[in-house]
């Protein structure tokens, strides 16, 4: 992964006009669409599931980056693959048998990511990192858009970057940050080694989504 990717999170979009919001970010230069799936158990909020992802799939050609903030994700992998997800990320904290779930996603034929909450040590994924296409580091406590970036995660981003380099995975595995990412916080993430920026409110909270995406890239290039 070389060029910085921006993945707007639909969580902060107008759910009554998903087709319009997808057009807005596609025209605005988004690389992926980030889909936040919440079950009210793993996180204290509810969003949407496979039927909505399937309708989104019909309205965009952008890769669907599906972030599962749910317990027992293994029960739903097949449904999200059939709905059209290109990449499915599960939380390490939600998987007792993490190796098995990551293998299940890969064998279902899509790319696979593993996510960590802000307080979860990187060591939890040390022994599975060669199985994934993406590592997602949460920079807020998951559950809601518009929260404040937690800067204490920055050293973990740098440590993840070193771990990927040590394992010879740096060119193949994306390092994604999610939560409170905006033009003022993105540069430190990218400097620490992030290659994919998820941004909800920083994109959909702006009148011009394309300009908001460009602002994230500009800030991070500097
Ligand atoms: C938080 C979600 C994020 C969220 C980010 O639980 O995983 O993807 O949409 O929203 P912002 O960018 O507003 O922090
Ligand atoms: Zn997310």
Image (cartoon, grey):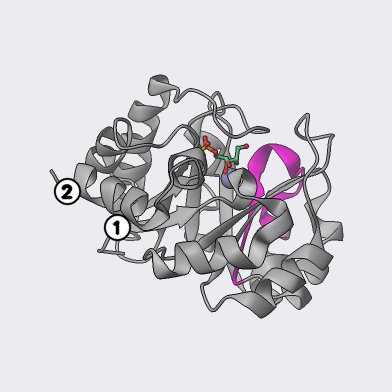
Q: Which residue is mark 1?
A: 4
Q: Residue at x 77, y 46 (%)?
A: 47
Q: Residue at x 68, y 69 (%)?
A: 56
The circle drawn on residue 221 is 2
The circle drawn on residue 186 is none
In the shown orientation, is residue 101 left or right of residue 139?
right
Q: Name the one closer to the observer, 111 or 219.
A: 219
In the shown orientation, is residue 50 left or right of residue 144?
right
Mark 1 neighbour class, 10 Å CA radius: few under 14, some 14 to 19, many 20 or more: some
Considering every residue shown, the one lying at the far left of the view is 222
Q: Residue at x 46, y 56 (%)?
A: 7
Give the residues in magenta.
86-100
* Relative vertical location of residue 157 with respect to residue 82 in this rendering, above or below: above
SS class of the residue under badge 1? Answer: loop
Q: Earlier in the sequence, mark 2 or mark 1?
A: 1
Q: Name the one closer to the observer, 171 or 201.
A: 201
Label pair 2/1, CB-CB below 8 angstroms: yes
Question: Residue 79's quadrant in the figure?
Answer: bottom right
SS class of the residue under badge 2? Answer: helix
């Amino acid at each position: 992964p070389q060029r910085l990717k921006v993945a707007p999170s639909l969580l902060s979009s107008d759910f009554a006009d998903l087709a319009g919001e997808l057009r807005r970010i596609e025209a605005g230069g988004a690389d992926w669409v980030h889909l936040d799936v919440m079950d009210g158990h793993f996180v204290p909020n509810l969003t949407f599931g496979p039927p909505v992802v399937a309708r989104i799939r019909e309205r965009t050609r952008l890769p669907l980056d599906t972030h599962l903030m749910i317990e027992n994700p293994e029960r739903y992998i097949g449904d999200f693959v059939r709905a059209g997800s290109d990449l499915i990320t599960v939380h390490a904290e939600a998987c007792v048998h993490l190796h098995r779930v990551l293998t299940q996603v890969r064998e279902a034929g899509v790319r696979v990511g593993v996510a960590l909450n802000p307080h979860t040590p990187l060591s939890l994924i040390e022994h599975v990192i060669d199985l994934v296409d993406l590592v997602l580091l949460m920079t807020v406590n998951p559950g809601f858009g518009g929260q404040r970036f937690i800067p204490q995660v920055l050293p973990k981003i740098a440590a993840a970057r070193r771990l990927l380099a040590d394992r010879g995975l740096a060119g193949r595995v994306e390092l994604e940050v999610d939560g409170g990412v905006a033009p003022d916080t993105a540069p430190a993430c990218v400097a620490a080694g992030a290659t994919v920026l998820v941004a909800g409110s920083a994109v959909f909270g702006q009148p011009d989504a394309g300009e908001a995406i460009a602002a994230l890239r500009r800030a991070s290039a500097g």
